[in-house]
Amino acid sequence: MDWFAADGYWMGRLLFQRSLAVVYLVAFVCAANQFRVLIGAQGLTPVPAYLRRAYGRRSPTLFRVRYSDGLFAAVAWAGAAVSAALLLGLADLLPLWAGMLLWLVPWVLYLSIVNVGQVWYGFGWESLLCECGWYAVFLGNNDVSPPWLALIALRWLLFRLEFGAGMIKMRGSHVWRDLTALYYHHETQPMPGPFSWYFHHLPKPLHRAEVLANHVTQLVVPVLLFLPRPVSTVAAVVMIVTQLWLIASGNFSWLNWLAVVIALSVVPDSLWSRVGLSASGTASSPAWFEAVVIAFAAVVLVLSWWPARNLVARRQLMNASFNRLHLVNAYGAFGSITRVRREIVVEGSDNPFEDDAWREYEFKGKPGDPWYRPRQFAPYHLRLDWLMWFLALDRTSHLSWFMPFLRKLLAGDEATLKLLRHNPFPDAPPLAIRAVVYEYRYTTRAERRATGAWWHRERCGELVPPMSL
């Protein structure tokens, strides 16, 4: 069929699939490195206990048959190995049907992980990765031209990702509507990066311009994705530049990276050729492949009813999946902006009756030591650090995992300590532990020059009083 093939997007497909393989690889390595502490059999929220509960019994996952930490590790590392093979181009060396099946493997493996990940995998970018991975199956390989229907589905995904985020902001808080959101966001975002202090101290008129540009990028530009070239190309490039700006300003796991990956599929070969990149292959498509892609497009169309309705709903859902396969989801981020940053600081002591005897545990990503400059971790996802940010916002609903975490620190659990940046008790665990609440703000330029500190903090309460085993 002449209308079926998009011959001008060979490079866009190649870059999308190879870049997606990189994100898959990072996601599987994250899972392998962190699961034992978080959701392992002896973890903070164990998978076996979750699967015995009502909702857990409905989750489609390979672990329905059997769960063990060894099996989980095998699934995670197998996913990493397949992702690496896809990155190296194995799918393009195989027959079309085999390449499609190879792309299906990481989708099945990662969906199995997400569906038992519980609160640790409750982020919008988990569903986004599952959805991207499913679309990649139907893009084909070098045996066929990129199918237009699959490319349009990717544009629809990018539209939902950007437009959903823009609408949730406009509906969520007046600081987005009056253009003052960035007066606070860089300081209160979940995990600041190495440049976030500098972003925060940009002039306020520039902050207002940033918010206005964000609204244009998320509410106007996505519509242009469905117009002919070069308008759609310009829209994709604007989105890529905007996402790179967000990547520089903070750590948002692979959310922004996936947005860039999807936008790459919109850029035509004619533009890639100007920078010396080109790709090509066999142009004809077998009838069975065209039938499969048409069926895929029909499924996307049917499943789009729920997220499309959500976009215009008065009470818009943010980062919602309407099916257990995490396909054709609703997206959005930062519908509300926190104006004051509070952090939970975990402290241990061998002499809990002496105020000066308490020493702090330091996390890898979340703010702690005021003199420690935040690091860049994204697209790697520090799940424990992110949940510590949510704990500071809601100090009751997250205690179900936080109290077991404190007990593991009291027991000197080595796997748990590996998720931290610094253990103040390297020889033996402390006798007591507590969780203190601090209010953090960025230092001013003058304070930074005088003290060298990135943060100023003041103690404002106690979440967990001193406890021992």
Image (cartoon, rainbow, N blue to C red):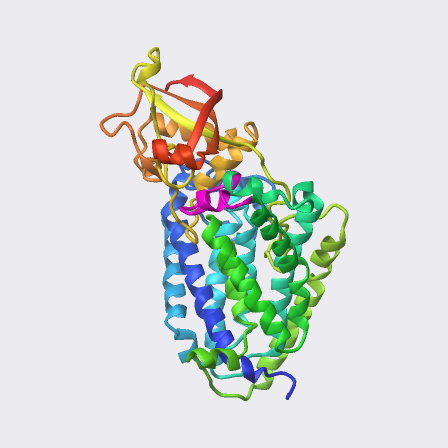
Quadrant of the image occupied by residue 122: top right
**Residue 322 seen in this snapshot:** no
Q: Does 192 appear in magenta? A: yes
Residue 334, percent from left and from top: 60, 45
Residue 152, percent from left and from top: 63, 72
Residue 412, percent from left and from top: 31, 29
Residue furthest out toward the left:
427
Residue furthest out toward the top:
353
At x 76% / y 54%, what residue is drawn? 312
From what the image shows, is residue 404 above or below residue 313? Answer: above
From what the image shows, is residue 354 above or below residue 256? Answer: above
Residue 110 vs residue 172, the one in the foreground: 172
Magenta region? 188-203
From what the image shows, is residue 229 above or below residue 244? Answer: below
Image quadrant containing the C terminus: top left
At x 64% / y 58%, what residue is drawn? 218
Quadrant of the image occupied by residue 285: bottom right
